[in-house]
Image (spheres, rainbow, N blue to C red):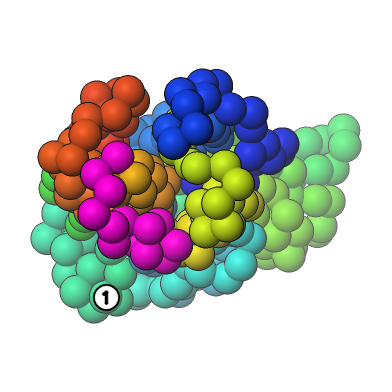
Amino acid sequence: MKRLKFISAVSALALLGACSPEIYEFPVQMRTPSDSGYDFSGKTISVVYVDKGLPSDSTFTKNVADGFALKLEEDYFNGEQGVNFYTIPYSEGAKYSDRDTLVNLVMDTGDDVIVLLESPRFGSIIKDQNSGVWNVPFQVSFNIYDSMSKLDTVKTYVGKSDFSGGTGKDVVSIWENSKEPAVNVGYLAANKFSPNWQEEVQYLYSYSGEYKWDEALEAASMFKWDEAMAKWIELADTNKILRRACATFNLAVGCYFLQEYDLALEWLDQSDADSKLQFSSQLRRKIINRKTYR
């Protein structure tokens, strides 16, 4: 879940009575799958590139892979280093888009997601006679396998472009000037796997003026879900049915935000067993939808 640009513990929508809970509206930005359909949140990722042992591979290809990993780390690891990075030697006749190849890499790396960058194909490298700048056309292929996905298949993405290789005297000098454009290529290619964000309104129940309920609500408003949930678990240990229903409903909400969808349904079942609250059906639909399309 993305932190709110504006945090609001929000105003009560309904005060049902002195002994009744208040309902708090809780607007949040929720992560949704990328334009590619992939959602890598909570998963371990390896970026692997194929090295033919040529200058183009040791510089250009590596930097494309670097750019791809950088973008994934920004999107899924809060900018921290979190993507593992490997290279494999080129093998004549190897099929790098085969599922077995990617599954073997999952086994070798121990990571959930494999991004395999094949060795790029370069077109005719020509030096412009007027500017003296080398033009380098290329094609890159990324093979993606998410071992946690229900699809259990490899998707291949192919892109073509070109870059300016500087004004050096020979072709070898091109690779000395390729770092920035190569990183850019990888970074832009990874945009397709960036999560989207969608505003969603969720609801929490609380008993205003009661210390533990207020503390839990305050923690939730600051997205300290573990702290809020620890307090709701304490509050759920009561013989007062409505209060228990409210506490377990809030626990379901917390699990939903933490993407613990099975546990969220368990807490919601307990809440419904005590007293089906106003927003129970809405929350259940959201949990099931997230669980189905994760």
Q: Amino acid at mark 1?
A: Gly
The answer to whether residue 249 is visible is no
Q: Which quadrant holds residue 124? A: top right
The foreground one among 155 and 258 is 258
User: Would you name the residue on which mark 1 appears?
Assistant: 110
Dot 1: few (<14), some (14–19), or many (≥20) neighbours within 10 Å?
few
Queried whether the magenta region covers residue 189, the answer comes back as no
At 37% from the left and 64% from the top, the residue drawn is 234
- In depth, the one of 2 and 238 nearer the eye is 238
Mark 1 residue element: loop
The image shows residue 247 at horizontal and vertical percentages of: 35, 48
Decide: is 219 above or below 270: below
Indicate the position of residue 205 as horizontal and vertical percent values.
44, 38
Residue plotted at (80% across, 43% down)? 133
Identify whether 98 is placed above or below 62. Answer: above
Range covered by the magenta-colored residues: 230-242
**Residue 116 position within the rendered picture, expressed as x and y whole percent measured from the top left:** 35, 58
Q: Is residue 293 left or right of residue 231?
A: left
* Residue occupying the point 17% across, 63% down: 103
Q: Is residue 211 above or below residue 31?
A: below
Picture quarter containing residue 164? Answer: top right
Q: Is residue 91 left or right of residue 17?
A: left
